Image (cartoon, rainbow, N blue to C red):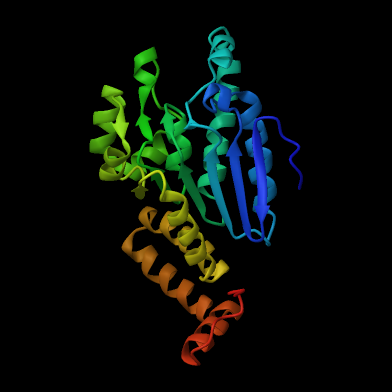
Amino acid sequence: MDNKYQTIRLDIDGPVARISFCRPEIHNAFNDTLISEMTDLFQAIKLRDDIRVVVLTGEGKSFCAGADLNWMRRVKDYSFEKNLAESLELAELFSLIYNLPIPVIGRINGAAIGGGTGFVAVCDIAVAAESARFSFSEVKIGVVPACIGPYVIKKIGEGKAREFFISGERLSAEDAYRIGLVNRFYPDDQYDAEIDKLVKTILSSGPHAITMAKQLISDVPLMSSDQYKPYTAEMIARLRKSDEGQEGMDAFLNKRKPNWVKE
């Protein structure tokens, strides 16, 4: 896979894929081209078994400042059908990232505004620089955080979503941490080192176990107790008898590192 894209950049370092919004001159605002390119890239990564962690970030001073103004000027004059088609493409992209079988870490290096907060919310773990700022600013221009809504509401809960979707006010990294939009935040000169530690921690865990952990988290809240009891029992039984589970338990019992740890 090469860097064939105009609006994003891919860097692969062993099992780690680093994906960057690369439109720093407009604070990494997204348009239809970026949505298409990001969809193509994440679909390709989904099919690879050599990549175990994705780190998503932005070039320059911002993470993602929401929708590109030039794109918005075009969108304003689209028909309802054209608006619906492009909105569905964005919704599909968020779903693709959120449901990726491998973990996605958000390296939130700066402002995440409007739709940019959606890319924060679909990350499994979002780590922010202390200087990062956030806002669900859509109401300020007469629209709502619609496509990002399902993921943000899952992250921060209905009560906080009501407050900040309605107010559109700016949030600090500490605010975002307090409401659960980001998982951690650190001083600007420390957060990269903390992300590196997090990546190393993830790589020490079983790849298939991580995939199944993500599936468990998505599936169980939708189930009744009669459904999740057999579902979870079968999941752990299958994992115990899987090659990875057998290797992991044997390594633990014999005080050695499992074969997926490449140190």
- Residue 200 picture location, percent across and down: 51, 64
Residue lying at the far bottom in this picture: please name it.
254
Quick check: can you spot residue 100? no
Which corner quadrant holds the C terminus? bottom right
Image vertical order of residue 170 relative to residue 151, above or below: above
Quick check: can you spot residue 253? yes
Q: Is residue 86 left or right of residue 65?
A: right
Give me the residue at 64% from left, 61% from top: 15
Residue lying at the far top in this picture: please name it.
77
Work out whether residue 118 or residue 63 is closer to the camera in this orientation and state it: 63
Residue lying at the far front in this picture: please name it.
189
Quarter of the figure with residue 157 = top left
- Residue 64 picture location, percent across and down: 49, 31
Q: How many labels does the image show?
A: 0
Give me the residue at 50% from left, 64% from top: 202
Quarter of the figure with residue 22 = top right
Give me the residue at 76% from left, 48% from top: 1
- Residue 242 picture location, percent across and down: 58, 79
- Residue 106 picture location, percent across and down: 48, 46
Image vertical order of residue 181 relative to residue 219, above or below: above
Give me the residue at 28% from left, 29% from top: 164
Image vertical order of residue 177 relative to residue 246, above or below: above
Work out whether residue 238 or residue 256 is closer to the camera in this orientation and state it: 256
Image vertical order of residue 159 relative to residue 205, above or below: above
Q: In this view, does 124 lie to the left or right of 136?
A: right
Quarter of the figure with residue 108 = top left
Work out whether residue 29 or residue 77 is closer to the camera in this orientation and state it: 29
Q: Is residue 3 left or right of residue 217?
A: right
